[in-house]
Image (cartoon, rainbow, N blue to C red):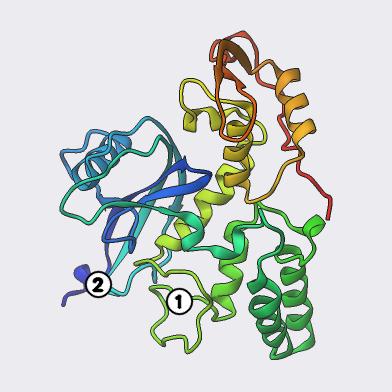
Amino acid sequence: MGEADRNSTAIELTAVLVAVTDEEPRVLTILDGRALPSGPLESEHRTLQGGLRTWVERQTHHSLGYLEQLYTFADRDRTLDSSKRVISISYLGLTRETKSSGGDGPGWASWYRFLPWEDWRDGAPAMLGGEILPRLRAWIDASPDAATRRERAQRVEASFGAEERNWNEELALQRYELLYEARLVPAAGRRQPIANPLPGEAMMHDHRRILATGIGRLRAKIKYRPVVFELMPPSFTLLQLQRTVEALAGRRLHKQNFRRLIDQQGLVEETGKMLAETGGRPAKLFRFRREVLLERVVAATQLPLSRSA
């Protein structure tokens, strides 16, 4: 292999496509959940987005709607192939789940299947106190010097606050990278296998890291932009809207605060129709006032997270 081959660079386009179905945040995958939709940038692709749309539609037969650039990943050890650097330009897309098909094994999966420690809707996950924190403390204790020990302890405290009031849902990427550094999760760049990895399915290359990046970005974005409505049907109840936000945030919201906030911002309006819900009285149906985006810049919409025990 010549010097040019060893120093070659390829550009990959990768998509984190999110939907919320039955109160679960779902991500579109290929290869039976082992990878995100992706493919190389080719000469016939006029734009990056155009190339990404081509690959997603070819691999999953799913057309794309809302899309924004997420991040560029260029680490040399992104893949097991050390002969070239593969730069991944990733995008975050919001959509509604539809049946996927194609020869690349496409399908939808809960993103908590890959990052189970991110779901706090029923309180702190049992694996946090049972596995993650004890193993991170052992990693701290194994530090080569006092400065490293302090630095590791500070990062663990900031990323994995064991109490609900200390949990920052936006730090999904920081948590994943900390677990990777502590040798608790496998990834492509690691040649030596991990004897006892944490629960949560691995993905090819660094696609689980890209997914964690998408989760963190979306959790931050729903606090100040009404992008959650890209995931909603044309009409919905306020409870369905709240459950969708909770699914993405991995946290429960205070019902009264949530509804007060929605009302204050004027983001929805009644349709005049009702939905008969099982076991309860009919609920009003609402729709997103899309024209509100043209009327004004949307004010900060901080998630009214419940801090109760």
Q: Quadrant of residue 259?
A: top right
Q: Is residue 75 above or below residue 150?
A: above
Residue 117 rendering spot, x and y as whole percentages: 60, 65
Tell me the mark number nearer the camera, choosing from 2 and 1: 1
Outermost residue to the right: 308
Residue 273, x across and y down, in percent: 55, 13
Label 1: few (<14), some (14–19) or many (≥20) C-alpha neighbours in 10 Å: many
Q: In the displayed image of the protein, which residue is found farthest to the front?
A: 279
- Helix or strand or loop: what does disc 2 sit on? helix
Residue placed under numbered mark 2 in the picture: 6
Q: CA distance from mark 2 to mark 1?
A: 25 Å
Q: In the picture provided, is 176 more to the left or to the right than 75?
A: right
The residue sitting at 58% across, 33% down in the picture is 240
Which sits in the foreground, 281 or 163? 281
Q: Amino acid at mark 1?
A: Pro
Residue annotated with mark 1: 186
Residue 105 to residue 15: above or below = below
Q: For the N terminus, give its image quadrant.
A: bottom left
Give the image quarter of residue 270: top right
Asked if residue 105 lies left or right of residue 181, the reply is: left
- The quarter of the picture where residue 287 lies is top right
